[in-house]
Image (cartoon, rainbow, N blue to C red):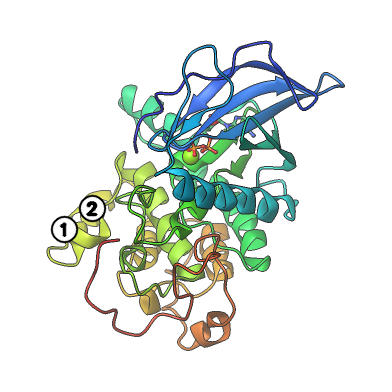
């Protein structure tokens, strides 16, 4: 991801009834601030500011966008707005809570309930620094809740499409919530290369690399498997496009045997099947495996034909502006075309 080079809003700034306390994070597309609302309640405000398109110097509030970048900036802005609007419909303890969004400074701001904690990615890194692994009981507990949140997202006919440990946030009470439905950025027409697609190598399913689409709940299932793998191995799986030509995952899975129960390793393998039809066909199937006591019998093979029931009508945040075909995947995916 491109680094965020823009100046953040100054600490103490009053904006739309909120007072900015400080910047808490920034990525290539946005800056996240801790702020207080009029009642003194802490919120997290995410500001749309793609660093490749917008320039904001120290002391300025409104970013400068060149004429050439303006159309792409506006499409991205619409996607960001869609992200907020879609999320605002979802109310679930395991999904970040969007409270408001507003326009100011020629851009858009999404206001979320502020949660103190850290990302699962940071947790993995801390464990690795200590020379230890993320334990199985922790993985089962966290991902059971993550799946509950994701079921709610899917029940709203939305896909996350950028699931990874950095977007799974662990509150200080230990409960996880899904963050960053910013995959909406990818909606942008492929002919407009300046707003680069943001799939994350290792966590993105193979169908996300393909222009033809074929995205569905199975795509988030791949990323769930990849995130669990990252917890277990301490590193992301081999990127899906590389796996298509020289899959090295079997060896990595073998290394996990003995450290984790065969049921868990089998489940992660199952989620990470390159062919979407060979992945678990429902989140419920995954929940059942995670809930089972570790010594329980191995997970059943994926039921056939369930995709037919899931296939129609899915709208990821990706594809909202028509960039992707949301139809169900074919049994054999076509040749990969990098976006
Ligand atoms: N609601 C929130 N409460 C607390 N921190 C948050 C919240 N939303 C985002 N953050 C912080 O900002 C970081 C980046 O947020 P995210 O939505 O993933 O944006 P990005 O598009 O930059 O990845 C998170 O890892 C987290 O540290
Ligand atoms: Mg993120």
Q: Is residue 140 above or below residue 129?
A: below
Q: Quadrant of ligand 1?
A: top right
x and y, in percent, of residue 332 in the image? 29, 83
Q: Nearer the viewer, residue 125 or 19?
A: 19
Residue closer to the observer: 171 or 328: 328
Which residue sits at x=54%, y=44%?
180
Q: Position of residue 25 (x, y in %)?
A: 51, 25
Instruction: Identify whether 206 is placed above or below 162.
Output: below
Sort mark 1 into few (<14), some (14-19) or many (20+) by Cα contacts within 10 Å: few
- The reply to whether residue 319 is in sight is yes
Q: Residue at x 69, y 52 (%)?
A: 85
Q: Which mark is residue 75?
A: none
The image quadrant where one finds the C terminus is bottom left
Q: Residue at x 46, y 17 (%)?
A: 57
Q: Which residue is mark 1?
A: 248
Residue 254, given in percent of the width and then of the height, sits at 22, 56
Ligand 2 closer than 8 Å to label 2 CB: no
Q: Are marks 1 and 2 in contact (CB under 8 Å)?
A: yes
Q: Secondary structure at mark 2?
A: loop
| Label whose residue precedes the other's in the sequence (1 or 2) | 2
In 3D space, how far apart are the residues under numbered discs 1 and 2 (Cα atoms)? 7 Å
Looking at the image, residue 85 sits to the left or right of residue 80; the answer is right
Q: Is disc 1 placed on a helix, strand or loop? A: loop
Q: Position of residue 256 (x, y in %)?
A: 28, 50
Numbered label tally: 2
Camera-side residue: 146 or 26?
26
Q: Which residue is mark 2?
A: 238
Q: Is residue 130 left or right of residue 100?
A: left
Q: Quadrant of the N terminus?
A: top left
Q: Where on the picture, by quarter, is residue 265?
A: bottom left
Which residue is drawn at the image coordinates 60% and 13% (left, top)? Answer: 10
Q: Quick check: 104 above or below 233? A: above
């Amino acid at each position: 991801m491109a680094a965020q080079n823009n100046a953040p809003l100054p600490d103490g700034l009053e904006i739309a009834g909120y007072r900015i306390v400080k910047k808490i994070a920034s990525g290539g597309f946005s800056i996240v601030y801790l702020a207080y609302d009029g009642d003194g309640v802490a919120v997290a405000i995410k500001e749309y500011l793609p660093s490749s398109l917008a320039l904001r110097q120290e002391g300025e509030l409104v970013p400068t966008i060149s004429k050439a970048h303006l159309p792409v900036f506006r499409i991205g802005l619409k996607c960001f707005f869609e992200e907020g609007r879609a999320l605002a419909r979802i109310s679930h303890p395991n999904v970040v809570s969007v409270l408001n969004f507003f326009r100011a400074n020629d851009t858009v701001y999404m206001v979320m309930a502020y949660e103190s904690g850290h990302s699962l990615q940071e947790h993995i890194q801390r464990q690795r620094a200590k020379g230890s692994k993320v334990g199985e009981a922790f993985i089962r507990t966290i991902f059971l809740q993550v799946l509950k949140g994701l079921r709610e997202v899917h029940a709203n006919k939305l896909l996350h499409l950028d699931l990874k440990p950095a977007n799974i946030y662990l509150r200080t009470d230990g409960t996880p919530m899904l963050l960053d439905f910013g995959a909406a950025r990818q909606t942008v027409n492929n002919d407009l290369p300046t707003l680069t697609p943001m799939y994350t190598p290792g966590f993105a399913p193979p169908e996300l690399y393909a222009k033809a689409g074929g995205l569905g709940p199975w795509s988030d299932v791949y990323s769930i498997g990849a995130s669990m793998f990252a917890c277990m191995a301490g590193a992301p799986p081999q990127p899906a496009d590389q796996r298509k030509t020289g899959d090295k995952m079997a060896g990595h899975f073998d290394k996990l045997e003995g450290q984790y129960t065969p049921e868990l390793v089998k489940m992660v393998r199952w989620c990470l099947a390159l062919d979407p039809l060979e992945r678990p066909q429902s989140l419920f199937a995954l929940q059942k495996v995670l809930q089972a006591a570790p010594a329980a019998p191995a997970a059943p093979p994926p039921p056939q034909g369930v995709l037919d029931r899931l296939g129609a009508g899915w709208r990821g945040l990706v594809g909202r502006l028509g960039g992707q075909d949301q139809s169900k995947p074919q049994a054999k995916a076509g040749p990969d075309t990098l976006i």
